[in-house]
Amino acid sequence: MPSLLLARCGWCSTKRDLCLLHGAVLRRRHLLPAADAAAALAKLLRFAAVSPAGDLRHASLLLSFHLPFISSAASHLAFFYNTLMRGLAASSSPGAAIEVFTAMRRAGATPDAFTFTFALKSCTRCHSLGRLPSDLHAQAIKHGCLGARSPHAHVHNALLHAYASRAAVDDARRVFDGMPIRDVVSFTGLLTVHLKASDLDSAREVFD
């Protein structure tokens, strides 16, 4: 039965499924091995936060309600925060992802490369945020997610685009120059920041 419930959580495809399966996990959590219960909640959270058929409000409630259990049972707590941040960063309220990031830090969870990718995406999409890309830049370096030896190209690209969205040419250029690996996303970000700054000559140099 525990393995069947875990499998069903992975098959969740509607809000009705989400409510029914979440209820089943609530009723039987004490009967499940802690790792299985955490895995079931992770599957439900991923559907609620990321799926087009999901429900971000339910995802937020799921994480907050189960956080004490998840904190003790999950081997990688950042995954749960990252999943919710991913959904919020892509939503119509991207600034909420930064609120989750702040809550994550207050809870003592260690951010990883995906954490910063989603937080920076939120910064890119929401310019009214109090937290600037430079704040996240410093923290990402501190946690080893940025730098010449960092393999996380997606974090570098997310930071580059966050600076580009604010036309911060010098900051964006420093990120670009310090990237160990550059791809089409990197060059697009640099091109974008020059266009936003109305520097057509520099943009043409990037394009050429």
Image (tube, rainbow, N blue to C red):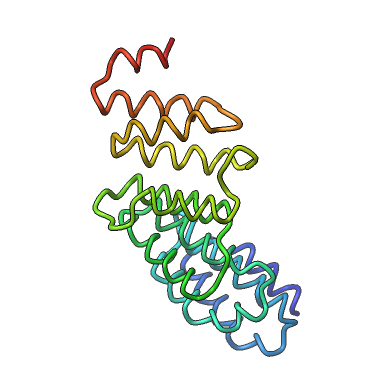
Residue lying at 33% horizontally and 29% vertically, measured from the top left: 193
Q: Residue 153: x, y in percent?
A: 58, 38
Above or below, 63 relative to 131: below
Q: Residue 20: x, y in percent?
A: 53, 77
13 and 79: which one is in front?
79
Above or below, 37 relative to 151: below
Q: Residue 148: x, y in percent?
A: 60, 37
| Residue located farthest toward the top when viewing the structure as drawn | 208
> Left or right: where does residue 176 sit relative to residue 168?
right
151 and 99: which one is in front?
151
Residue lying at 35% horizontally and 62% vertically, measured from the top left: 96
Above or below, 22 relative to 49: below
Above or below, 123 relative to 204: below
> Left or right: where does residue 191 sit relative to residue 31?
left
Quadrant occupied by the C terminus: top left
| Circle count | 0
Residue lying at 52% horizontally and 52% vertically, measured from the top left: 140
Quadrant occupied by the N terminus: bottom right
Dividing the picture into quadrants, the one containing residue 93 is: bottom left
Dividing the picture into quadrants, the one containing residue 21 is: bottom right
Q: Residue 34: x, y in percent?
A: 71, 81
> Left or right: where does residue 152 sit relative to residue 33?
left
> Left or right: where does residue 3 sit relative to residue 121?
right
